[in-house]
Image (cartoon, grey):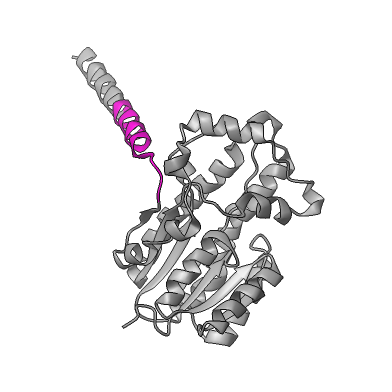
Amino acid sequence: MMRYAGKVVVITGGASGLGLAMAERFAAEGAKLALLDIDRARAEAAAEDFRNRGFAAIGLAADVANAADVAAAAKAVRAAYGAVDVLCANVGVQQFGAIDTLTAQDWQWVMGVNFHGVVQCVEAFLPLLRSSEGQRHIVLTASASFFQIGIRMAAYIASKYAVVGYGEVLRRELAGEGINVAMLFPAGMTTRHLESSVAARPSELGASKLDMADITAMVADAGIARAAHVASAAYAARNLLDELDAQRGYIITHGDYRHQVEAKQQEILAAFAAMESAAFAAVEATK
């Protein structure tokens, strides 16, 4: 029995990269796909490829930063499939740059897509998830940079922190309805992410600037080892369905940064110890 036979899976950014790799995993388990992408031609071509291989798939154009676009896509999915069992809000654009060089338009664009785009996807598709039954999931694409901080990425990292905070609350609020919320933390991947980010930026917000010096500085500061940090999208998506079966809230795809997570936790625990010690000293001083 295929795990997702007859189930409907919606994937934003589904025409390439990680989104397409996730679609392959779900299709192999019998899912019906709805691939949303800002690039209509790519979305339709990807869906056609799946259909040519015997899978059910539709491709839809949607800019997740545009609430009307997302609502229209949800309406089209309802018309095609009736309900949704899995929503993969796989959203992300990148703007490198030192904090004092980022413009108001940079912040507006990155937060508008990476955070508000996720919120708008959930708002549009949650009614369709609620109209389905059985195992249901919402997957929010965060980033390994949530744990592995590097300079020149303030806008991107801030947006992914917002996604995780939103996801943590959403997971708690939907748990009683049997809808699992998982946050996916991919590290670097050999995808079109940088290219598609530049192409996706609205002209009214100015051109997206990419300086390789910013990337070099970020990699050095974050302590990224390319061999462990960068993988194919297919590799990053390899265990997604198993992790969803386990109802995990955090899904780590790849990357060698566990030591950085542990170091941060130790720093936080040390801060608690300092607070408790100061509180004890204050009480003792009153005796």
Q: Residue 39 versus residue 173: which sits nearer the camera?
A: 39
Residue 228 in picture, x, y percent from top left: 42, 42
For the N terminus, the image quarter is bottom left
Measured along the vertical axis of the image, is residue 60 above or below residue 274? Answer: below
Residue 118 placement, left or right of 259: right
Q: Vertical placement of 215 versus 140: above or below? A: above
Q: Position of residue 197 (x, y in %)?
A: 67, 52
The residue shown at (37%, 67%) is 241
The image quarter containing residue 170 is bottom left
Q: Quadrant of the C terminus?
A: top left
Q: Could you tell me residue 203's position as x and y percent?
A: 80, 53
Q: Which residues are magenta?
A: 254-271
Q: Is residue 225 left or right of residue 50?
A: left
Taken as a whole, is the magenta stretch helix, strand or loop?
Answer: helix
Is residue 241 visible from the viewing direction of this image? yes
Q: Nearer the viewer, residue 175 or 194?
A: 194
Specify whether residue 71 is in view.
no
Task: Please tell me which residue is depicted at 70% across the width and 31% down the height of the picture.
Answer: 101
Q: Is residue 208 left or right of residue 168?
A: right
Residue 209, image quadrant: top right
Residue 234 locus on image (x, y percent): 46, 61
Total numbered labels? 0
Horizontally, residue 203 falls left or right of residue 263, namely right
Q: Residue at x 81, y 51 (%)?
A: 204
